[in-house]
Image (cartoon, rainbow, N blue to C red):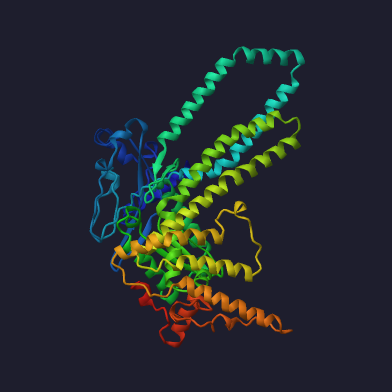
Amino acid sequence: MEILGTMELFCVRLMRNQHRCLPAYLTRSFQTSHCRQRQSTTRRTLPSTELYSTNTCRILRQPETTDSVCQLQLRPSSSQRQLFSSENVRTVLFPVGTPRPDPAVHCLPVIWLPKHGQNFFHTSAPHRALPAPLIWLVLKPLQKIVAIILGRSIRKWWWALPPNKQQLVRQKVWRRRWQLVAGGMVAMVIMASFFLTHLDESPITGRTRLLVFSRENYMELATVTGDGYMEEFAELMVPEKDPRHQVVERVVEHLAQRNKDIPEVSSVPWRVHLVDSPTINAFVLPNGKVFMFTGMLEAVADVHQLTFILGHEMAHAVMGHSAEQASMSHVVDFLSLILLTAIWAVCPRDSLAVLGQWIQTKLIQFLFDRPYSRKLEAEADQVGLQLAAKACADVRAGPVFWQQMEISDQLRGEPTVPEWLSTHPSHRNRVAQLDRLVPQYLELRERCSCPALPATDPRAVFAQSVKVLLDATRDLEGEAGKSLKPQALSQTPTSDHRRAPHPGGLATALLASSATGSPPALTLDTATHL
């Protein structure tokens, strides 16, 4: 109390010495004697407020005079908070160097501002609610823990009952069996109503799907996720002036421009981020942020394959596959909680309950999660081929890319995983599906007024290249101490050298062209004029 009074007295003395520092009125109990003379007038003109200083006086030194700026905030009392608004606050501006009225005499909340004026009343930023999918991801482990505790408690309660009381409970349940059946029917009706009210139609394919989390929810989550990726890859980002970044950016812009008739494509601001990493991967967030790794540029042979890959990833974002998969997983997890509770309630020991829980988890993965993920991947291949066809890319390059990936995995010695264990279709099944779709989207490409394609089919060129590579491998196997030379693929005779797979991928070709100054077979103009 003594410190506050000393500070107030010191501020008043500063005012009298023409330093013009506004005193900090902490409460009405610390008002000066000058203000007490006008206390009744002030109460009639202004609502009850509490003035408190949020910052010390900051001295702004001018060539001829010294002005001080005191930042105050007004906090209305709870009884008159509705009367206190921005209209009740008077902000008085005085030019620098002019005498100010004494606040001790006028007793009004006057805020001294610099010459150009600046509002010191800051409002705190509104707290953004967490996206619903993020809340579900946080609560998902907690739900399982609650189910385990509930089931285990039921089991302990049951085994703690004497045999006669267990018999009474069985009889009571049997007498109310029809009530329990009716309750189960009501629960099924509620669940069916929930499913029917959350059905949605896929934007491009028109497929009916269950959507618990809306696309807007995942837009909010994508913002948070995108910021995290930007921090994670901050030191690996390829500059925008790099030719590799420019190719990817132009292909994305071309895809968005040629497919702007789709509202989900035209309403998203697409932004490219190229990460310098050997990882063969690329993904697109629902808010339009494209993350591609340079390893993917090394894997594709030409700009047509790059267009197909980017179309595939953009299809995931346009179709809202992340929201759809999370919605189905949310429903399945909710239903599995009932089974999980029953497992822990029925199993006589915790070890058997843990085993039953593990079996339940694996069954859900192999019977639902992974098949559903493979279904969405196949749909993204189809929609991505459609987006690439409308962008005038050679859709025949789509199957070739997955053939290249299959051979690349074999050369690296990676084990072949059965499709039913994977979240993605096998390379062979992808090639077969795309081969069936190629004639359909070649017709779509012609309807979009695209230039004619060369007569040479890239699939036939790739098959011929693989045949020559296998023949060279057989010849080299007979020579002791020699290995397969990497230039065997580059020496493959082809009728169209521009469409043959580049030995170092598209990224190497672009870097070589930028270093030598000579235009590569696939220049930046090729990416623009597909």
Q: Is residue 152 left or right of residue 235?
A: right
Towards the viewer: 21 or 280: 280
> Can residue 249 be seen at all in this image of the molecule?
yes
Q: Residue at x 30, y 66 (%)?
A: 62
Residue 323, percent across and down?
46, 47
Using the rendered view, name the quadrant where residue 310 is placed.
bottom left
Towards the viewer: 449 or 5: 449
Is residue 513 placed above or below 396 in the rendered structure? below
Using the rendered view, name the quadrant where residue 437 is placed.
bottom left
> Can residue 286 be seen at all in this image of the molecule?
no
Q: Residue at x 55, y 56 (%)?
A: 425
Residue 365, percent across and down?
60, 46
Is residue 438 placed above or below 421 in the rendered structure? below
Q: Residue at x 60, y 39 (%)?
A: 142
Residue 402, percent across and down?
52, 65
Towards the viewer: 7 or 271: 271
Q: Quadrant of the C terminus?
A: bottom left
Using the rendered view, name the quadrant where residue 159 is placed.
top right
Is residue 513 placed above or below 128 in the rendered structure? below
Q: Is residue 494 left or right of residue 451?
A: right
Residue 98, percent across and down?
23, 59
